[in-house]
Image (spheres, grey):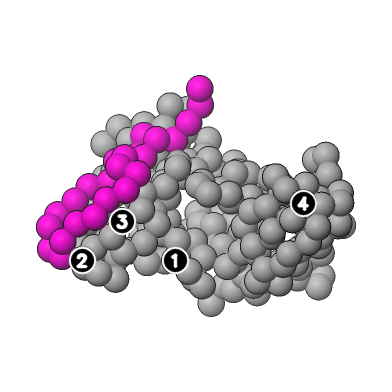
């Protein structure tokens, strides 16, 4: 089954403790991205990647890192999480930059206390 | 700054009603406008619109884009309780390869 898989689905952590949210897609998609969704602000892009080893900042990259060492995986790293990073996070992928109908993962609800 | 505004914020209808959702934008040089449906989890893709004035249909859902007046509408006819969701509009720009989302419209369909 074609899908985008995120882990974990729920995470509660403390300020400053490094964490990684994993994202994996099995569709051989080139383009992957991370979004956060907050009430009243909608979905905002954090980082995106057009292919292996090619990543770039989205609208709200501060406090986040990503890597794209292999095509299927695009982890989101929070080196020192803060409470303002409490949010619902989505990973998305699409075939390539011209195919804009992105497929979304199931979401990761992160709470930083 | 690119802006995508959806209206209304939320609405409640009864089964069988028709709903019309609006997406207005202030975005230059975008490649496509997309509609997504978000229930309790991930957004799922509904439509992609690239040309003005051409209606896209899928069952009871339809959508059209007006590039002159800078808006798109999503219509749902003969609504069912399963249509209850947040509907998201987004614009894709090739420059920056990003989707800019509106805040969404929450639709509740009552039996």
Could you tell me which residue is drawn at 77 percent across and 47 percent down? B80
Whether residue B107 is visible to the viewer of this picture, yes or no, is: yes
The percent coordinates of residue B45 (x first, y second) are 63, 44
Helix, strand or loop under label 4: loop
Q: Which residue is mark 2?
A: A113
User: What is the number of the mark on residue B111?
Assistant: 4
Q: CA distance from mark 1 to mark 3?
A: 11 Å
Which residue in the protein does label 1 denote?
Answer: A38
Kindly report the distance in space between the C-alpha atoms of the residues bearing marks 4 and 1.
29 Å
The chain that hosts pointer 2 is: A
Instruction: Name the residue rendered at 55%, 62% in the picture.
Output: B100
- Foreground: disc 2 or disc 4: 4
> Is A98 displayed left or right of A80 in the figure?
right
Q: Quadrant of the C terminus of chain A?
A: bottom left
Do pointers 2 and 4 mark residues of a single chain? no
Residue at image x 74%, y 56%? B110
Question: Which residue occupies the extreme left position in the image?
Answer: A17
Q: Position of residue B86 (x, y in %)?
A: 62, 57
How many other residues sit within 10 Å of disc 1, few (<14), some (14-19) or many (≥20)?
some
Q: Which residue is mark 3?
A: A110
Residue B94 horizontal/vertical position (percent):
56, 55
Chain bearing tag 4 is B
Q: Chain of mark 3?
A: A
In the rendered image, residue A17 lying in the magenta stretch gets the answer: yes
Give the spatial CA distance, label 2 vs label 1: 17 Å
């Amino acid at each position: 089954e074609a899908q985008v898989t995120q882990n974990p689905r729920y995470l509660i952590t403390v300020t400053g403790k490094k964490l990684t949210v994993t994202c994996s897609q099995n569709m051989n998609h080139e383009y992957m991205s991370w979004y956060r969704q907050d009430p009243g602000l909608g979905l905002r892009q954090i980082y995106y990647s057009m292919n292996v080893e090619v990543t770039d900042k989205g609208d709200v990259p501060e406090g986040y890192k990503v890597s794209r060492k292999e095509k299927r995986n695009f982890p989101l790293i929070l080196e020192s999480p803060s409470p303002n990073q409490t949010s619902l996070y989505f990973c998305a992928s699409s075939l390539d930059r011209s195919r804009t109908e992105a497929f979304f993962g199931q979401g990761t609800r992160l709470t930083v206390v | 700054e690119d802006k995508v505004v959806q209206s209304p914020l939320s609405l409640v209808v009864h089964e069988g009603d028709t709903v019309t959702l609006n997406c207005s934008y202030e975005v230059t040089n975008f490649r496509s406008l997309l509609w997504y449906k978000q229930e309790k989890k991930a957004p799922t893709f509904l439509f992609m619109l690239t040309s003005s004035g051409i209606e896209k249909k899928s069952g009871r859902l339809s959508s059209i884009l007006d590039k002159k007046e800078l808006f798109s509408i999503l219509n749902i006819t003969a609504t069912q309780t399963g249509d209850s969701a947040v509907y998201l509009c987004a614009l894709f720009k090739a420059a920056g390869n990003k989707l800019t989302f509106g805040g969404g419209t929450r639709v509740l369909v009552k039996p």
